[in-house]
Amino acid sequence: MKVLKDAGIPFSVGTTVHQKNYNEIREIAALVGSHGAEGYYIGPMYPAGRAVSLTDLIITQDNWDSAVLQYMEAIRDGLVSPADEIWYKLVKDAEPGENPVRDQLYITRRGSRDLRIDPMGNAYVMAKLRQWHPRFWTLGNVLQFPLRAIWHHSRLLNELRSYPVSSTLLNGVDVRIIRTEEQQAKDIAIHTDFIESDSVLTRV
């Protein structure tokens, strides 16, 4: 963080909350804020990706409640700025002791602001969505199609964006309401379906 700050490079910091750090969120926030991070965010560890083999570290709902309350306290006390400004509203509106994102374990991003790219070029939204709904393993491969084509014309991505936003105000979708299909992830990776377009589906 000091190297980035000294170099004038803006940065944000995130913490994956697990059994060994859920009681240290306020301290981490203070450290991050003292080094000039533009934003700080937390997210619960969930049984997907590498965490499938680390289930002993998965937090309980009570652990998550504790972590979120520390996070909100750190924001309220000005120790750190949240990476997502919606947290200012959540902190302001929350009742004392209330965790406004209790169901975050089940919330996935909608692909409305960013995508992730794995080492094989597959664009995806979140590991939990890949794990629990394998047909979302890839929304398109950037080695085959321009990223702009995937962003605007992937059928899976547009389907994800069509689901109602969860009540957490985090602009996410509850994975429990996403329809399921018996389709293997590798099939999807090879045969990604796109909405028709005259120009953007030119292969790279």
Image: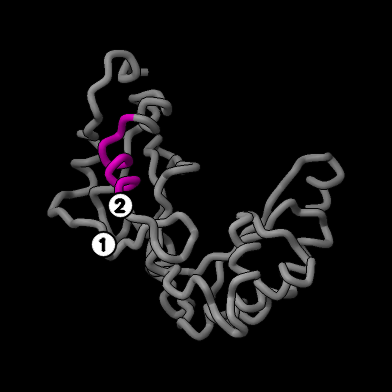
Q: Main secondary structure of the magenta part?
A: helix
Residue 32 x, y percent position in the rendering: 76, 62
Question: Can you say whether 32 is above or below 163 in the image?
Answer: below
Q: How many marks?
A: 2
Give the residue at mark 1.
Answer: 177
Asked whether residue 154 is drawn in magenta, I would say yes
Q: Residue furthest right?
A: 6
Residue at the left extreme?
A: 182
Figure colour scheme = one colour
Report crowding for label 1: few under 14, some 14 to 19, many 20 or more residues within 10 A (C-alpha).
Answer: few
**In the figure, is residue 6 to the left or right of 21?**
right
In the displayed structure, does residue 159 sit left or right of residue 6? left
The residue lying toward the viewer, choosing from 122 and 54, is 122
Identify the amino acid type marked 1.
Answer: Ile
Residue at point 42%, 28% (across, down)? 147
Height in image: 190 above or below 32?
above
Disc 2 to disc 1: CB gap under 8 Å: yes
User: Could you tell me residue 150's position as x and y percent?
Assistant: 36, 31
Which numbered dot is residue 163?
Answer: 2
Query: What secondary structure is marked by label 2?
Result: loop
For the residue labelled by badge 1, is the local secondary structure a helix, a strand or a loop? helix
| Residue 71 point in image, percent of width and height | 65, 72
* Residue positioned 26% across, 56% down in the render: 133
Reply above or below: 186 against 72: above
Q: Disc 2 versus disc 1: distance between alpha carbons?
A: 8 Å
Q: Which residues are magenta?
A: 153-162
